[in-house]
Image (cartoon, rainbow, N blue to C red):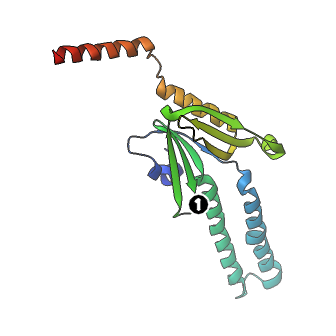
Amino acid sequence: MKFFERLLFGSHLSEDEVLFCTIHRHWSLIAGDMIKIALFGYILPILIVLYVVGPSSPLSYFFYAWIVLSFLLTLYTWFNWYGDAILCTNHGVINVTWDGFLDQSSILVEYRNIESVSYRRTGVRETFLNCGEVSLVRASGMDITIADIDQPQRAAKLIAKYKDEILNPPGVTDRDVLNKFAKTVAENIVINT
């Protein structure tokens, strides 16, 4: 597992769980916030320090603090975006919602409870930026829809692929399962008689 994935998502995984892939929300969700932070948090105070106040003026320390706070806001915005993810593991799909350093939640949907996976792109923004929503149709009838996923078609295919690999491992056929079941039944009959 990568360092950031272990740091952010390790608490959502059990000890025997293996993380196959991480699917993130689209970068366009934070583009507007990052542009605002760049303009008002970095460019504006630097221009004020260089052209109005002067780099060695005591007032320039206020603007240096402004830049440091903007950097912290940049980190928070990035972590808030990166922390909202879908984790594909050997147990199922985990939808992680990150609303701050102290506010995280997750929902585990086991592969055996997923009937199908679908995706949807609607509108100009989603079509041109290749983002959309991924829906997990559960056997209970309660679907889980995750919006603004980057490359939703690829994400849906990955989830379906991992589901198929876990539930139908290669080399195991129905005949193998029936032989194992028959052997277990035969052993139980011998033990009980």
What residue do we see at 39% from left, 16% from top? Answer: 177
Dot 1 crowding, Cα within 10 Å, few <14, some 14–19, many 20+: some
Say if 133 sits above or below 37 in the image. Answer: above
Percent position of residue 4, x then y: 53, 52
- Indicate the quadrant containing the C terminus: top left, top right, bottom left or bottom right: top left
Q: Residue 189 versus residue 47: which sits nearer the camera?
A: 189
Q: Is residue 123 left or right of residue 56?
A: right
Percent position of residue 34, x then y: 73, 61
Q: In the displayed image of the protein, which residue is found farthest to the bottom?
A: 58
Q: Amino acid at mark 1?
A: Asp
Q: Is residue 12 left or right of residue 62?
A: left
Q: Residue 10 versus residue 44: which sits nearer the camera?
A: 10
Percent position of residue 55, x then y: 74, 81
Can residue 30 be spotted in the picture?
yes
Residue at image mark 1: 99
Q: Residue 89 versus residue 142: which sits nearer the camera?
A: 142
Can residue 2 be spotted in the picture?
no
What residue do we see at 69% from left, 83% from top? Answer: 62
